[in-house]
Amino acid sequence: MPDTNLNLSRREFSALALAAGASVSFPAQSHSESQKSHAMMTPEQESALIDQIAKGVSYSFRTPILRRPSDYGLEYEDVFFPAMDGVMLDGWFIPREGSDKLIICNHFIGANRYGYAGHLEPWTGNGGFEVNFIEAYKALHEAGFNILTYDLRGHGHSADGAGSITGVGAIEWRDVIGPVRYAKARMPNAKVGLHSLCMGCNSTFIAMEKHPEEFAHIKCMIALQPLSAAPFIERALIDNGVENAVEKFNERYAYYSSFRHTDSNAIARAHAVTVPTMVVQVKDDMTTKPSDAQGIYDKLPNADKKLLWIEGTPVRYEGYRYFSQKPQEMVDWFSGRV
């Protein structure tokens, strides 16, 4: 294994922190600083960077479920159901009496149905703040929605699938179909919307491509920060001078997970998302590029679509807590369509 005592740029460390869930965080640096730092990298250090990023996105990791809906005055049930391939998933059902409207929510890598304990070590490297989804659930509940939220495989209390390997959607798409079926059995006449985040959103796109019949009744979706790997690789590697970065990344990624970065590409699946969809993205996200969200939005076939840019921050994780702090746009989107 290459030497991992690296002298890396802040941008590289930031991308690595996002990928691996590491507690590493630096402010943005100038292009000249990045070039200077890259010039100090040896081939061994470059190889180690690629190895760590590939390994970081190949394995899921669990963080604690710190809060419950009852902490916010919401009655709820602990529920569980199988993914399409039988992996058992745990979740919460938050009922809204008298309502036939339901939102199904999932999460990003390293998070769970509650959110992400980013204010606690060793998970402080992505902004140092907590992401609390329950605040968003409360806003939806007050607006008249039932909520079903669940842990993807290898997260929260859900079972592992292929060990702790993650496909960034390439396996987890099977999970998305589980709660859709559970909801249909429990509330057969419900009007259903999806609130899917990052890896959970990639999973939803892939599930819709593979099994569109499972989603024929879905009214709309919020797609919060879906991603394609190529801009991520560009930010972490190509922009810092790594040659043949995609090929090198895929070689290491396949070594750890047996996947390639194209297996979960959101742009390539966006054509399959036929429901009204709002794409949400931190515009200056240091770990990807605006062209990714724009490319996903452009490929969506339904004319009822919206691209919401979150501005004023380069921190991706600010996007994950955006609707917990400012829920009105989320509530308005679902209220007008579900």
Image (cartoon, helix red, strand yellow):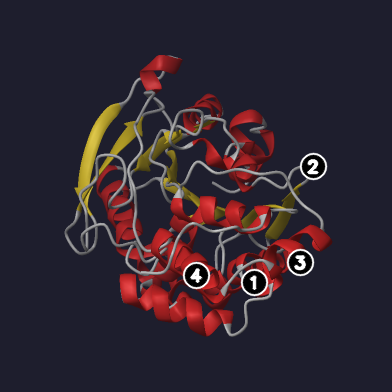
Labels 4 and 2: the sequence-earlier one: 4
Cα distance in 3D space between marks 1 and 2: 22 Å
Labels 1 and 3: the sequence-earlier one: 3
Amino acid type, residue under disc 2 in the picture: Gly
Q: In which quarter of the image is residue 319?
A: top right
At 68% from the left and 39% from the top, the residue drawn is 329
The residue that label 2 is drawn on is: 312
Question: Is there a contact, CB below 8 Å, between mark 3 and mark 4?
Answer: no
In the figure, is residue 12 to the left or right of 163?
right
The residue that label 1 is drawn on is: 234
Q: For numbered disc 3, what is the local secondary structure?
A: helix
**Label 2 crowd (10 A; few <14 / some 14-19 / many >=20):** few
* Residue 187 vertical position relative to residue 97 in the rendered view, above or below: below
Cα distance in 3D space between marks 3 and 4: 17 Å
- Residue 35: numbered disc: 3
Q: For numbered disc 1, what is the local secondary structure?
A: helix
In the figure, is residue 281 to the left or right of 82?
right
The residue that label 4 is drawn on is: 50
Question: Is there a contact, CB below 8 Å, between mark 1 and mark 3?
Answer: no
At 42% from the left and 47% from the top, the residue drawn is 106
**Label 3 crowd (10 A; few <14 / some 14-19 / many >=20):** some
Cα distance in 3D space between marks 4 and 2: 29 Å
